[in-house]
Image: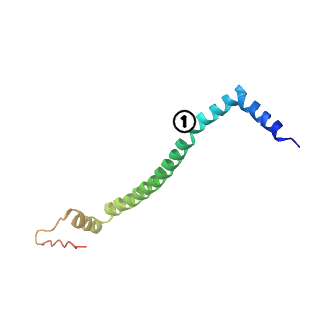
Amino acid sequence: MMDKSRLKSLLIKAISNKFIISFLIFFFWVFFFDQHSIWERKEYKSRIEALTKEKEYFLNKIKKDKNRIHELKTNRENLEKFAREQYLMKKKDEDIFIIIEEE
């Protein structure tokens, strides 16, 4: 077993070693302050997750829109329904009543 004074002297020698000090400074600089620090990596990871969710949302929206376009191009009744609902178009002998629900 080592006594306390021997352990203390080894610790002081290790701390006063210029290579160990340089390594520790380099390690803390890279870990906390560098462009690729742990904080930056955490921010990048959360940004990637958000962008992945956004990508999935837009891919689903594109798929739905493609189906809707195909449906509108192939079926005349759906096209007429879409024009009436979205653009408030009407026939000459019709009246349109817009009902707005209050919340």
The kind of residue tagged 1 is: Phe
Of residue 41 and residue 60, the one placed in the foreground of this image is 41
* Residue 36 appears in the picture as rendered: no
Q: Residue drawn 47% across and 52% down?
A: 50
Q: Return the residue at label 1.
A: 33
**Image spot of residue 9 (x, y percent):** 79, 33
Could you say which is closer to the camera, residue 96 or residue 2? Answer: 2
In the picture, which quadrant includes the N terminus?
top right
Residue shown at 53% from the left, 48% from the top: 45
Residue at 71% over, 32% down:
15
Q: Is residue 54 above or below residue 23?
A: below
Q: Is residue 33 left or right of residue 11?
A: left
In which image quadrant can residue 88 be found? bottom left
Where is residue 53? Give x, y as percent.
Answer: 47, 55
How packed mark 1 is, by other alpha carbons closer than 10 Å (few <14, some 14-19, many 20 or more), is few
Counting from the top left corner in percent of width and height, residue 17 is at 73, 27
Q: Quadrant of residue 100?
A: bottom left
Q: Secondary structure at mark 1?
A: helix
Q: Quadrant of residue 18?
A: top right
